[in-house]
Image (spheres, helix red, strand yellow):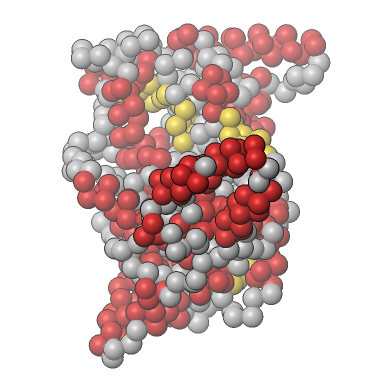
Amino acid sequence: LSFLVLTGVYVGYPPKQMHDFTASKVSSHWIFHVAIAITVLSEIGVQTSMIGFMNGVIQAQSQEPQMLNKTEVEIGKVNLVDEEEVRNSESFNYSAFWEYTIHEINVAKEKIQTNVQQKKSLENCPKVFVYPSLTKDLSDGGLTKEIAEAFGKGFGKVKIDTNDENTNIIVSSLMRDGQFRSTNQFSLARILEYRILTSKHCITTNPKEADLFYASIFPEPGGETKWRKSCQGDHNHTNEHDKDFILQHQQNLTKNILSQLVHLTPETSCRHFLVVSKGHYAATPCRGFWSDPIFEFQNVMRIAYSNANYETDETSDELYRLDSQVTLRSFPNLFSVPYPSSLHWKRSQPCPWKKQLDQEQKQIDRNSNTNRTTEKISKTIGVQKKHFMLFTGRLDHGDVPVRQEILHQCQNNTHGTCTLVIKPGEGFKKFRFALSDKLQSIFCLEPGGDSPWRKSISDSVASGCIPIIFSQATDANWPWFWNDWKAMGRILVIPRKEFVQGKIDLHTLLHTTIPSDLIPMMQDTLSRYGRRFQYSLDEDENDGVRAILDGLKQESLKKMNANGVCQI
């Protein structure tokens, strides 16, 4: 028995580490061997003493290790920390959280460095055939080449309430250049129409040359009511008579669409795509061509802001529980894309806040010459922005427990590091002031909304504000746009349940314990890769429109044989 116990300890935990039983180093393999020893020892009546020993080890697991000094945590040198340790520690372990975050950053950096992709250019854009003559009832009046119909109107002149001269200059120039717009959050289909139809490189009128086929069906911005009326009329689905009418209406609509998509064949079906400018489930009433598709539409690709059906559970670690199986069955070939932001970049210009970022870097360089510490240098970025962390939005919808905890922490924040903009004004004012605040903020708090996917995240990335995300369901969305750089440009606060319980303090997490190099590194990441998360006003080989077209082409190629024919 002694040999068994000692062998178990040795196999799971080498002697040179036996002196250290802190939570971050206890081996589950060692505990397994001790469990075997308990089973054997229980036969001779010593189970109680061994269980006491086991409880002591498990208690040691829940103890918080010594807090790491920020200057000791370098992005290039970090010990791997299991995500489960971050999730299961009894009192939140900030140092383990940041070690795991930095590990993820290093993995992302390595992947970017080793993943050599073909250089993008305007000329190698996938060629898209846009169906030009769909009837007006299907095309909501016809295709558009008007920038205001796609991106919304510009804001014109407005006075921004800020003492930050740099931000005033940036906001004024964005409004003057038309990059700051009242973009409808449901306008993606119109944006794609405009960008493809006005492109010199991404469009073809010859279906034989097309990489992709776009059928812009019901593209006018609207929510679930719009999609219900378009696909089943104004009928009550609970009435038995109306149910029969709705079914007939859906079947006739699908036949009508199919008759107008003259190039949709089994051989080309995997190169066709449809767009719903909302969560995919909004168009559930569009049975036959969008949801629960008939054979002809089963291979067609679908674009929406969401990637899976979900349910909510406010008592769990994750509010939104995704159901990928239902999604795959009813919405095949579904791919998620970000909401349009209200701030749009231009191909000919760097990111809109680049001038401000360059000025901040010069200030850091000047501070370096005076031998200030790295920790103090990182704080100069916060000093030069009006807000350290910002929440804009409502408190009565979406992930209410997280939003209420944000409210509680910000209201009790005595450091001046948290700003709340609750229920911003309606219309232009709402977008105008929310975006100007984001331009002046280091971190933007992004709890889930009515769904896990939130337009505010697009606005934050486009504005150079590092998004703080509280849901893994949100974080898992939009892989084409940020999977390679996401770890370097956002912070995922998990577990959610511990945040709701007040165990994770945002000021401690983002201001006191954050490694000093992370803020400037993440801001630089957004300036380098954030272009992909927004839809530029003009033709741009590195923006979100191009990411959509490249992603669709790659997915279609996976379903084609060597002769370019789609496989059913």
Q: Residue furthest right?
A: 239
Q: Residue at x 41, y 49 (%)?
A: 10
| Residue 343 visible within the image | no
**Relative horizontal placement of residue 468, taking residue 530 as reference (left or right):** right
Q: Closer to the camera, 528 or 315?
A: 315
Q: Closer to the camera, 206 or 447?
A: 447
| Residue 126 visible within the image | yes
Q: Closer to the camera, 203 or 61?
A: 61
Quarter occupied by the C terminus? top left
Q: Position of residue 208 (x, y in %)?
A: 24, 17
Q: Position of residue 444 (x, y in %)?
A: 52, 62
**Relative horizontal placement of residue 377, taking residue 318 as reference (left or right):** left
Q: Residue at x 49, y 15 (%)?
A: 257
Is 224 drawn above or below residue 508 in the view shown?
above
Is 321 drawn above or below residue 440 in the view shown?
above
Q: Residue at x 30, y 76 (%)?
A: 361
Q: Position of residue 335 (x, y in %)?
A: 44, 32
Q: Quadrant of residue 451?
A: top right
